[in-house]
Amino acid sequence: MIRTTQSVFLLVFAATLAAALPARAQVQNANQDALALLVKATGYQFAQVPDKDIYLFIFSASDAKGVDRWFVRVSYNNERKNWVVVSCTVIDKEDSTAFPLELKDTLLRYNSDVPGSKFAWDEANGDIDVQWEAPTQFLTGGLLARMIIDVASTCDDQYNNLTKLLEP
């Protein structure tokens, strides 16, 4: 009886494994287009940059003075395509802009105190971006949608404070 049960178990296990192998290959092939599938699963309207894995989402600004909309970008952040970055430029100044120390301190404090979106600045290009990064394998359409909203909301919520710190 035990031997029969073991045989049946092994037969069922082998059949399940054999059935899963083609499915696993399909999942690996789908991973090449994982970002496209995730972006579609957000349910938001978007535009794709031609011939690139870069997707653009436009959100209306509500609190940022002098800003009417935010352009949120979604792309892979490396060639292996194992991480996704959601980003939006919140401040765009001239190249080689030296940001004040008080502004940098504010950005670092925000990054330390608030989970989710993070600020990154690049003085060579004169911009400050809001970013959210996550491993591709852990993303769902719902999580990506929340990341996109968090980035756009952070831009809208923080823009006025940041521009005040840039005033002479």
Image: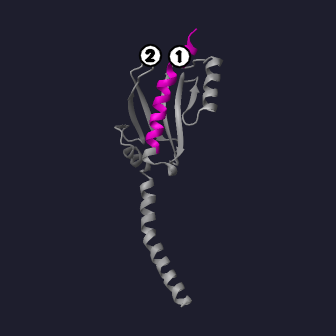
Residue 166 painted magenta: yes
Q: Quadrant of the C terminus?
A: top right
Three-letter amino acid code at the position of disc 1:
Thr
Residue under label 2, please give it.
65
* Cα gap from disc 1 to disc 2, whole angstroms: 10 Å
Query: Does 120 appear above or below 43?
Result: above
Quarter of the figure with residue 50 = top left
Q: Report the predominant secondary structure element of the magenta stretch.
A: helix
Q: Position of residue 125 (x, y in %)?
A: 54, 24
Circles 1 and 2 in contact, beta carbons < 8 Å? yes
Number of other residues with Cα within 10 Å of mark 1, as a class: few under 14, some 14 to 19, many 20 or more:
some
Residue under label 1, please give it.
163
Q: Position of residue 85 (x, y in %)?
A: 50, 39
Three-letter amino acid code at the position of disc 2:
Lys
Q: Of helix, strand and loop, which one carries label 2?
A: loop
Query: Does 68 appear above or below 83?
Result: above
Q: Position of residue 61 (x, y in %)?
A: 41, 24
Number of other residues with Cα within 10 Å of mark 2, as a class: few under 14, some 14 to 19, many 20 or more:
few
Which segment did they paint magenta?
A: 143-168
Q: Nearer the viewer, residue 64 or 54?
A: 64
Quarter of the figure with residue 39 = top left
Residue 156 painted magenta: yes
Which residue is pictured at 62% across the width and 23% down the height? Answer: 106
Q: Nearer the viewer, residue 21 or 79?
A: 21
Q: Which mark, residue 95?
A: none
Q: Position of residue 153 (x, y in %)?
A: 47, 29
> Which residue lies most toward the bottom here?
1
